[in-house]
């Protein structure tokens, strides 16, 4: 997790442009305070009534924080999107480092909620070839075309409409 977290922090700080922001990923589990058998025994009657298990790892979660506050409550839309992108890029690098191959990187509706500065920083990361093959979805094709052209990213643009794919050619 330390390897992942340091990669994530580096990507987040680069995109956010604010080295002072502190980002954290915390794993929360009921089982940090009691063992699994104890939790099952303690909740047995309740679980029988509910007809489901109310304790265990399926109740565990990750809490994403920025500057010691919960990201989903205190983070701006740009901070939340940058956090998500940082997670995806760190995940990509961990897979690449451990498996020796570059997975496809899918960034779905990635430009929404990002300001121009963050978009340009993301494109700078993508343009250097580190991430290999990249699929980006965007509801505004002209915006994508302009962003890729400005960044000098070689790309092909496709429209999907009613299940049919139409190629728009290469963007250089």
Image: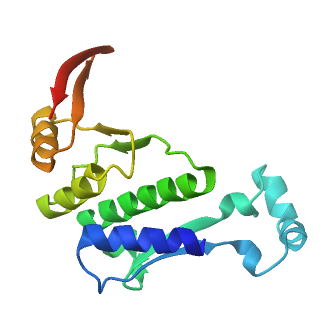
Q: How many marks?
A: 0
Q: Quadrant of the C terminus?
A: top left
Q: Position of residue 2 (x, y in %)?
A: 58, 75
Q: Residue at x 54, y 68 (%)?
A: 4
Q: Residue at x 35, y 69 (%)?
A: 12
Q: Position of residue 102 (x, y in %)?
A: 49, 45
Quarter holding residue 32 = bottom right
**Whether residue 121 is situated above or below residue 159 in the rendered picture:** below
123 and 21: which one is in front? 123
Q: Residue at x 75, y 53 (%)?
A: 50
Q: Is any part of residue 68 visible from this angle?
A: yes
What colouring does the structure picture have?
Answer: rainbow
The answer to whether residue 28 is left or right of residue 170 is right
**Whether residue 10 is situated above or below residue 45 in the rendered picture:** below
Q: Residue at x 23, y 57 (%)?
A: 124
Q: Position of residue 156 (x, y in %)?
A: 23, 29
The answer to whether residue 56 is left or right of residue 69 is right
**Whether residue 22 is situated above or below residue 115 in the rendered picture:** below
153 and 67: which one is in front? 153
The answer to whether residue 47 is left or right of residue 41 is left
29 and 118: which one is in front? 118
Q: Position of residue 8 (x, y in %)?
A: 44, 68
Q: Quadrant of the N terminus?
A: bottom right
The answer to whether residue 144 is left or right of residue 10 is left
Q: Is any part of residue 75 visible from this angle?
A: no
């Amino acid at each position: 997790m330390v390897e992942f977290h340091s990669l994530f922090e580096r990507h987040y700080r680069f995109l956010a442009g604010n080295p002072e922001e502190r980002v954290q990923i915390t794993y929360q589990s009921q089982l940090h305070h009691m063992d699994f058998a104890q939790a099952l025994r303690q909740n047995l009657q309740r679980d029988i009534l509910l007809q489901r298990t109310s304790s265990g790892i399926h109740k565990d979660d990750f809490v994403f924080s920025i500057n010691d506050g919960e990201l989903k409550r205190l983070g701006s839309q740009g901070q939340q999107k940058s956090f998500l992108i940082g997670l995806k890029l760190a995940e990509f690098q961990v897979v690449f480092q451990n498996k020796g191959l570059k997975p496809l990187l899918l960034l779905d509706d990635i430009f929404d909620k990002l300001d121009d500065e963050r978009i340009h920083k993301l494109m700078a990361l993508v343009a250097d070839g580190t991430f290999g093959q990249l699929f980006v979805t965007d509801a505004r094709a002209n915006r994508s075309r302009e962003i890729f052209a400005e960044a000098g990213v070689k790309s092909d643009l496709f429209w999907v409409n009613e299940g049919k794919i139409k190629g728009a050619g290469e963007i250089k």
